[in-house]
Image (tube, helix red, strand yellow):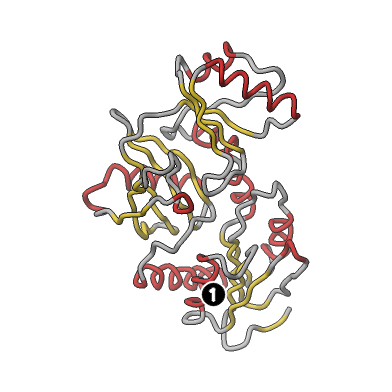
Amino acid sequence: MKEAKNGASLVIFSENPVYPTAKLLFENGKNYFGNVTFCFPFIGEKSAPCYPSLYINRISGVRFDDYDLNLLEEVENTEGVKVINPTRQQRLFRDKSRQFFFFKNNRIPHVQTVEVRGVPSIDHIHAQLGDSKSFVIKMNRGNGGKGVMVIHGQDSLISTLETFHALGDQKFIIQPLKNVKREYRVLCFQEQTLTAFEKINSGESFKNNKSHGAEFSPVNVEAHQKIIELACWTHKKSGLHLSGIDIIETDNELLVLEVNPTPGMTSLNQKQMDQLLKSMFGLLETHND
């Protein structure tokens, strides 16, 4: 194992060094780590583990290929190496259908979800989702709003599902379309709530993602205690070091929409970014004590 020069190393697993959060980590990580490097597993570029090293994975898993996690597992149990997030948890939360069972098993309030295999049946969907007339179809490993469809009417839903069945592709989940008043993202690291934002839709798309024009407006954490408590409880149950918890507010309830194990960080201010990197460095030091 190589010794890291000038202290600990930060290794960033990424698809591309110009992706905003990867670039942000690289630029700011130099303030806390003696050596900051990229690793691009899907183009054959690997990174030899240094001691001590903190690995952070910025790959979302939309390829349906876990080669990056396989590489991380090789170093995860190496002395002096810490991986954010644990690969076991990354595998779980990459998959939206597995997230549903996580919510259900931990009694976390969530949007009801159903999967379909084989010939679609409206009776089966009704039994799981009730009498909803509008639906959302999400790819199991979609990211940034990609692969999300809104379907109005049961006939349209069945027609769409029959098309997917004929194509031999049923890697998706179905949820009822909720009347969402507000949507929030809470960024958590260990026991800390780093920040919370309200996602404000641009009006040009139903998708509340930055890539589709949504704006992230910071909210007062103290004034949104119920949202923060739900996010922190979900984060604690997840076993993740770092997560982005998406929560929707309807007319009468708060529901967890998704747990993101590779949340974007471009909405963090400099103070929050410094706090995160300092805490990451502290996690590596604690791990090596």
Check the picture and name the quadrant holding the C terminus.
bottom right
Report the residue that reaches farthest toward the bottom.
6
Check the picture and name the quadrant holding the N terminus.
bottom right
The quadrant where residue 42 appears:
bottom right
As drawn, is 128 to the left or to the right of 273? Answer: right
x and y percentages locating residue 61 in the rendered image: 64, 51
Report the residue that reaches farthest toward the top.
123
Numbered marks: total: 1
x and y percentages locating residue 124 in the rendered image: 59, 14
Asked if residue 35 is positioned above or below residue 46 in the image, the reply reads below
Residue drawn at (51%, 65%) of the image: 21
x and y percentages locating residue 91 in the rendered image: 64, 48
Asked if residue 61 is positioned above or below residue 79 in the image, the reply reads above
Residue drawn at (59%, 44%) of the image: 142
Q: Nearer the viewer, residue 77 or 271?
A: 271
Residue drawn at (34%, 72%) of the image: 271
Report the residue that reaches farthest toward the right.
44
The quadrant where residue 108 appears:
top left
Q: Nearer the viewer, residue 190 or 33?
A: 33
Report the residue that reaches farthest toward the left.
223
Amino acid type, label 1: Phe
Residue drawn at (52%, 74%) of the image: 285
Callout 1 environment at 10 Å: few (<14), some (14 to 19), or many (20+)? many
Secondary structure at badge 1 equals helix
As drawn, is 228 to the left or to the right of 162? Answer: left
The quadrant where residue 274 appears:
bottom left
As drawn, is 199 to the left or to the right of 75? Answer: left
Q: Nearer the viewer, residue 171 or 287?
A: 171
Asked if residue 223 is positioned above or below residue 27 in the image, the reply reads above
Residue behind mark 1: 26
x and y percentages locating residue 248 in the rendered image: 37, 38
Q: Nearer the viewer, residue 17 or 213?
A: 213
